[in-house]
Amino acid sequence: MACHECDGIQSRSALEQGLTTHFITGVTGFVGSHLTHRLLLEGDRVVTMVRASDNEAARARLLPVLEAIGSDRELPLDNLLVFAGDVTQTTDELVAGLRAATDEHIDMTWHSAVTFKFRKRDLAEIEAINIQGSRNMILTTLGLNGERERPRYMHVSTAYSSGRLQGIVPERVVESTPDYRGLYEWSKHKVELDMARIQKQEDLDVTVLRPAIIVGCEDTRSVNHSGYYQVIGTMYKLFLMRRQKLGDAWDHRVPLRFEANPAMRLNLVPIDYVIDSMVALAARPELCNRELKVFNLVNEDAPVMQDIVDVMEASLGISGLEMVDESVFAERRMNAIEKVFSRAISFQAPYIKEDIRFETKRFRTLVDKDEVPVPVLDAPAIKRLNYAYFDLIRPEIEASLSAAV
């Protein structure tokens, strides 16, 4: 699927085997697993690294994740190589681990391993995985094939890596930003600065891919338990708790105020849209060059918060959800439900208050809307997402509530 020629340099795997060989990290995560699944279905060779005690345990950990994605076609697992490793290892250890598993030429490295932790107590882990781990991976890429045949490097970042940059977020690495919504954003911005510096220093082919808030799609049974799902999952748990506590006397009202901007657009992007976009960009021959490229993979017609909350109430058959301004919220002490909700969504809270817009001109110049259409996330689509997640988490939540009685 990818171009095989960069500045006149051709990959042996493309010439000799007629396929592209990808090295992917973060393959047990949402983006990495779906990317691996797609590339295997397209007939490419995928080499993956999974945290585990040995290669057998690594493969055993990954296969159920890929199977959960689902497909009408059989996944060609003969083209999948899994070895045990961790992005926090040194570059020498990473290169040795991969080369002990295979001597194949690597055409493209995709780095998607990440931790979404964001609290100060997690700073050491955030630095080790998000920052140092990313440095390790791009430096590892330098040593995989030799000086003249370096793989292309595809780095999965986030659309929010520019922090609280004023105005529309551009498709470039910004040198500085006035503030961050949390340590996760801070770490991703630091990494992008590293990517820009190393790319220039080493004359590398580097593409930075920036998805917004990723959700599932109707074609997959796999979901992401963070981001949007953390919010609706917490709401669903509160719904079940309320129903259990009040029984038939409950009027289906949940007295919950939360800080949010009803008019802002929440940039939700389905995972299939993200993978379609990534694969389309990787296949563009004009991007196969030793330059730094940055693309915002966002929803150009994102739903507004008011619609999302309306669908939430309709999905659960409840009322009482109230979005308020920060100053208004502070006028009254939080009730017990508001305290639970506030703690549970502390990571997501800034993203439902601030209207963040993104530039997509560079992306759409290369990938038009006929090839990768703007995702449709209207009320029926959002309701289907909600129901699918409720069905998935219901048994665990109901079991925990029963145990607490």
Image (spheres, rainbow, N blue to C red):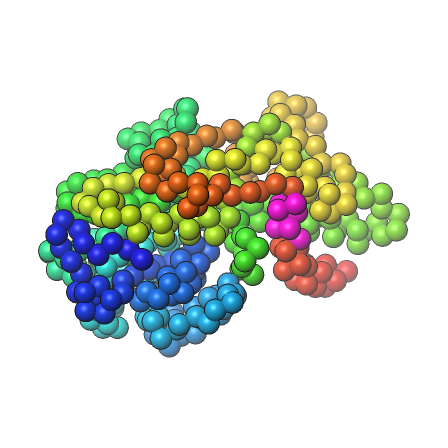
At 66% from the left and 38% from the top, the residue drawn is 309
Q: Which residues are magenta?
A: 380-387
Whether residue 96 is visible: no
Q: Quadrant of residue 311?
A: top right
- Quadrant containing the N terminus is bottom left
Magenta portion: prevailing SS class: helix
x%, y% of residue 112? 37, 53
- Quadrant containing the C terminus is bottom right
x%, y% of residue 389? 62, 55
Is 345 positioned to the left or the right of 369 in the image?
A: right
x%, y% of residue 399? 70, 63
At 41% from the left and 27% from the top, the residue drawn is 168
Whether residue 18 is visible: yes
Magenta region includes residue 384:
yes
Magenta region includes residue 383:
yes
At 31% from the left and 51% from the top, the residue drawn is 282
Comparing 200 with 67, the one in front is 67
